[in-house]
Image (cartoon, rainbow, N blue to C red):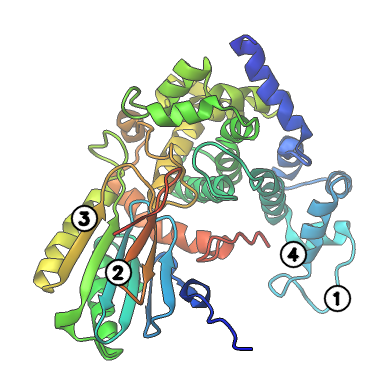
Amino acid sequence: MAQRPQPIEDQMRTLVVGVADFKISTDPLTYIATFALGSCLGITFHDEKHRVGGLLHVMLPSSTIREGQKIRPPMFLDTGLPLALESMIRAGAKKSHIRCKVFGGAELMLSDKFFRIGSKNIDMFYQLSDSLELDVVAWEVSGRVNRTIRLDNQTGEVIVKVPAKPEFIR
Amino acid sequence: MNKASEMQTVVEMTRSIPCAPAILPKLLKLTEGSAADIGELETLITMDTGLATSVLRTANSAYFGNASRCDNIADAVLRLGSKTLYRIAANTLTGRWLVHPLRGYGWEPGDLCRHSLCVAICAEVFAGFTNLADSSTAYTAGLIHDLGKFALAYANLSALDEVASRVPNEYATWREAETAILGYNSSQVTKALLETWGFPSAFISVGFYYQSPSQAPDVDKPLVTLIHAAKHAASQLGYGVGADGYYYEPDEKCLAEAGFTEEQMDAALPEILSAMQRFVAADGQIHFN
C-alpha cells in the first residue's frame, strides 16, 4: 500500500538563532527562529530564487561601545549586517534578490535619558540599510511589545508571535 | 470576597507550591561574611533533596571537580565556597518555583524564571560598578522582585485578562490597571509573600517599591534603585518579557541621582548577555548547573 506523503509542516526543522548570532540555511524545509527580541533587532534575509535564508539577531547599534575589546560581530548592527550580507552571498544568494524584513526594537515608556536601545537600533538600521542598499520589504518595529519570529525558508514569510496574542505573518 | 481577603487568598494559594524560596533569607544570613557555619549550612541544604542534588552535582562538575569525588554536602560546601553555594541555592529554589505553567501576562512556560534570572544578572553586574549593594544581595533581590506576579498568575484570576485588555487604552501603566481592576497590585502581593517568608526588610522594599524607587525608605533606596535599573535593562534584552513588560515607567531622576548613565548601562549589556547565555540556551531552555 502506498504511503501517504508527510505534510510539509511535519517535515520542517527549526534552526534557532540566539542573541548576538546569525544563522543561514539553504534548505527550504527549514524555519529559522529567534526568541524574545525585546529592544534587539531580528533581521531576516531571503533569496527565494536561490533558496537561501538567514536570520541575524543584533543587540546594540554600534561596536564602538566595545572599542579595543574583543567583540562578537553579530552582536552589533554595524558589524553584523555586513557579515550577514556577505554570508548570504557566499551561500549562493544574489544581492539583488535578497529581501530583508526587520523586527523588534521595543521601547520602554517615557524614556528620555535611559533605555533607548530600541530606537537607537532602528535609527542605525535605517542608516545602514540605506548605505548597504538593502531591499527592506517589511518593518515590524518599535512599540511596547516583545516579539518572537520564525522565517519560513521556503516562502520568505515571517511568522511573528507576541505575548498573549495570536501569531501573524509578515 | 473583599479585595483584602482576595489578596490574602492569592498569597495563601502559593503555599501549595512545593519548595518555595522561603529558606533563602536564612541561607543568605549563613553565607554572608567569611566564617559560614558548615554544619548549619549542611543541615539547611539537606532539608531540600533537589537543592542537595544540585550542590553535589556542581561540586563534582568538570569546573569544580578534582581527583577526589565529593559525596557529601559538607565537602561540597567547602569545595564550592559560600558565594557559589548561595548562587546555586537561589537559582534552584526560585527557578523551580517560577517555571510552573501559568495564565495571565502572556507568559510562555518558564518566562518569569528567565526574566527574573536576567534581572538578577543585571543587578549583579550593576552592583559591580556602583556602590548601591553587594553582588549577592543584588542578585537575590533580582530573583525575587516580581514574585507577586507569579502568585497572581498562579491563582488564575480571570481579572488578569481584563487588566491585559485595558492597558494601554484606559490605563497607562500595568500597575495602574492592576490597582483599579483588582483593587490591589502585584507589588503588594510580593510584599505580603516576602513578609510571610521572613525576608529581610530591604528585600520587602524591593518587592514593593522597585517600580517607584523614589518612594522607598531612604535606607533601602540604593538597593531598590539598583533593581529598578536592572529591571528595565533586563526588559530591553527581552528574556521572558510578557505582555506587561514595557508598561512600567522608568524613574529617570532617581537613576541619575544614583549615578547611573545611559552609556554605562548600554556598555554593560555584552557582559550581561554572556552571563545570561551560560544559563539560558538559544531555544530558551534554562540550565542552572
Q: Which residue is mark 1?
A: B68
Instruction: Using the rendered view, name the quadrant where residue B100 is placed.
Output: top right
Subunit ID for the residue under disc 2: A
Q: CA distance from mark 2 to mark 3?
A: 15 Å
Give the quadrant of the C terminus of chain B.
bottom right
Assess disc 4: are there few (<14), some (14-19) or many (≥20) residues with their C-alpha within 10 Å of its C-alpha: many
Q: Secondary structure at mark 2?
A: strand
Residue B154 in the image: above or below residue A22: above
Tags 2 and 1 on a common chain: no
Image location of residue A10, percent across then percent down:
53, 73
Tags 2 and 3 on a common chain: yes
Amino acid on which disc 2 is placed: Thr
Please state which of the two labelled residues, at mark 2 or mark 4, is closer to the viewer: 2
Depth check, front residue: B141 or B96: B96
Tags 1 and 3 on a common chain: no
Question: Which residue occupies 72% across, 35% down?
Answer: B25
Q: Is residue A152 left or right of residue B69?
A: left
Instruction: Using the rendered view, name the quadrant where residue B61 is placed.
Output: bottom right
